[in-house]
């Protein structure tokens, strides 16, 4: 059974930093992992993704140069370093994994996600 467990969420003032982690278990094959977020009343959106076959990454424009996605294959974990946080970053953040994606350009497309974590809340105050 595949489990994705997020941790590291919390409440910080604007300009602060948080590091989210996603621990994967039971996931024998995956070449794409991603972070999504969903704010109240809004659609879940992809924040960042990593094509684990070669490490290529994708970032939504709203988080470029502030967030960094990384993986640790030895520990089966994925992280999201979030700096210069803004109130508009407030959301539930979800870890996601794809068993096999055809190519890096498609990594993290919502319709391809095979597994989701339960989410971790990030709240950024003014």
Image (spheres, rainbow, N blue to C red):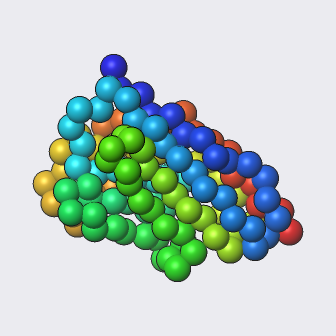
User: Where is residue 52, by image quadrant?
Assistant: bottom left
Q: Is residue 16 left or right of residue 8?
A: right
Give the residue at the far left of this rendering. Answer: 102
The x and y percentages for residue 94 are: 52, 45
Q: Is residue 29 left or right of residue 110?
A: left
- Decide: is 85 above or below 35: below
Front residue of 49 and 70: 70
Give the residue at the far front of this rendering. Answer: 74
- Decide: is 29 above or below 89: above
Number of numbered callouts drawn: 0
Give the residue at the far right of this rendering. Answer: 126
**Residue found 44% across the figure and 34% down from its top:** 4
**Is residue 85 something that shows in the picture?**
yes
Front residue of 75 and 84: 75
The x and y percentages for residue 102 are: 13, 54
In the rendered view of the protein, which quadrant contains the C terminus?
A: bottom right
**Residue found 23% across the figure and 49% down from its top:** 31
**Residue found 66% across the figure and 58% down from its top:** 18
Give the residue at the far bottom of this rendering. Answer: 65
In the rendered view of the protein, which quadrant contains the N terminus?
A: top left
**Residue found 69% across the figure and 52% down from its top:** 122
The x and y percentages for residue 97 are: 34, 43
**Is residue 45 something that shows in the picture?**
no
């Amino acid at each position: 059974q595949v489990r994705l467990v997020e941790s590291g969420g919390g409440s910080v003032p604007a300009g602060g930093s948080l590091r989210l982690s996603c621990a994967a278990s039971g996931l024998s094959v995956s070449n794409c992992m991603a972070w999504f977020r969903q704010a109240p009343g809004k659609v879940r959106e992809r924040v960042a993704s990593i094509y684990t076959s070669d490490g290529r990454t994708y970032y939504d424009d709203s988080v470029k140069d502030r967030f960094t996605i990384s993986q640790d294959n030895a520990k089966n974990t994925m992280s999201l370093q979030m700096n210069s946080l803004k109130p508009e970053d407030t959301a539930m953040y979800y870890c996601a994994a794809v068993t096999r994606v055809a190519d890096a350009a498609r990594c993290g497309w919502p319709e391809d996600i095979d597994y989701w974590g339960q989410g971790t809340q990030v709240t950024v105050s003014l």
